[in-house]
Image (cartoon, helix red, strand yellow):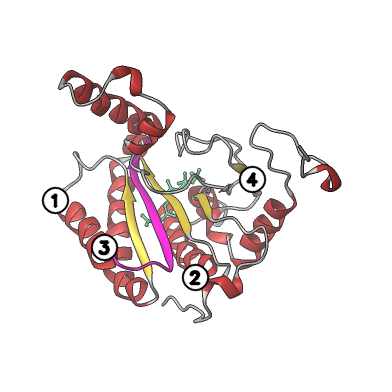
Amino acid sequence: MIEAETAPKADVRPARTPRHVGVIMDGNGRWALGRGLPRIEGHRRGVEALRRTVRAAIEFGLDYLTVYSFSSENWSRPIEEVSDLMGLLKRFIREDLSELYKIGVKIKVIGTRDNLKPDILALLEEAETLTRANNRLTLVVAFNYGSRQEIAAAARLIAYKVAAGLIDAAAIDETMLAQHLDTAGIPDPDLIIRTSGEQRLSNFLMWQAAYSEFVFLPIHWPDFDRQAFAAALAEFAARDRRFGGVTLPQQNAKVKI
Ligand code: FPP
């Protein structure tokens, strides 16, 4: 059950809260292994952590939360685990969709859809369609997602348009490429959190993360909670984001001409 506070977003968003947070939900398997449990139990507890995280994201006033739920590379896992993960996604949508809808969450799915089974595809589309008009928090579910595949697909699409005479090759720039990614229209993540202690991007939002801040937490995903989320946001708030520029001392920030 996902609960949310009813206060308007503007009232709850503290200064320097990121607008968009991406999360690499890592460590389910190790969490389970450490307790002598099957890996699927770690994933099940991972879904509970995801529920908590969506609730906290609303409370913290985020606009976008992107979660890496299944990567293009995860197909190489044992068939039973892939099937378990597909089952969990289906259950998550079936059990939580109406609640997510009620609390104002808009669901957007990014990733390749070509090779998905029809029942999964139908559920993902149902989730997007039902929640289309919501605007409290956009939950971007990266499913069957890989950044390299996404960028290659964008390049392919642009190339087709050039070949068809719809686009001048000289007009291709960063903005155009971004508009052909699955994330078109979604602001870049300000902060990317990865649990489990691993410190890598693993093919997640590589284009979009050009200027993201990273917080790596030494806890496994099933243990991620509101407190860990708040700590990551506090660390973000203390960072100095320069976007390739320099930070001027306050008194010099305005340049007189
Ligand atoms: C990484 O842990 C996690 C995943 C590959 C899947 C993330 C999935 C969930 C949190 C639950 C499913 C949620 C939905 C909506 C499908 P890992 O298995 O790589 O852990 P390990 O590195 O310790 O083995």
Q: Earlier in the sequence, mark 2 or mark 4?
A: 2
Give x and y (percent) for residue 231: 69, 59
Q: Earlier in the sequence, mark 3 or mark 2?
A: 2
Question: Toward which corner of the image does residue 120 lie, by quadrant?
Answer: bottom left
**Disc 2 element:** helix
144 in magenta: yes
Q: Is residue 118 left or right of residue 179?
A: left
User: Which quarter of the rendering shows the N terminus?
Assistant: bottom left
Mark 1 to mark 3 CA distance (whole Å)? 14 Å
Residue 118 circle label? 1
70 or 159, nearer to the observer: 159
Q: Amino acid at mark 1?
A: Pro
| Callout in the foreground (3, 4) | 3
Residue lying at 34% horizontally and 17% vertically, measured from the top left:
170
Residue assigned mark 4: 216
| Callout in the foreground (1, 3) | 3
Residue 55 circle label? 2
**Disc 4 element:** strand
Mark 1 C-beta to ligand 1 under 8 Å? no
Query: Which residues lie in the magenta part?
Result: 132-146
Q: Amino acid at mark 2?
A: Arg
58 or 119, nearer to the observer: 58
In this view, the residue farthest toward the bottom is 6
Disc 3: CA contacts within 10 A as few (<14), some (14-19) or many (>=20):
many
Residue 127 circle label? 3
Q: Amino acid at mark 4?
A: Phe
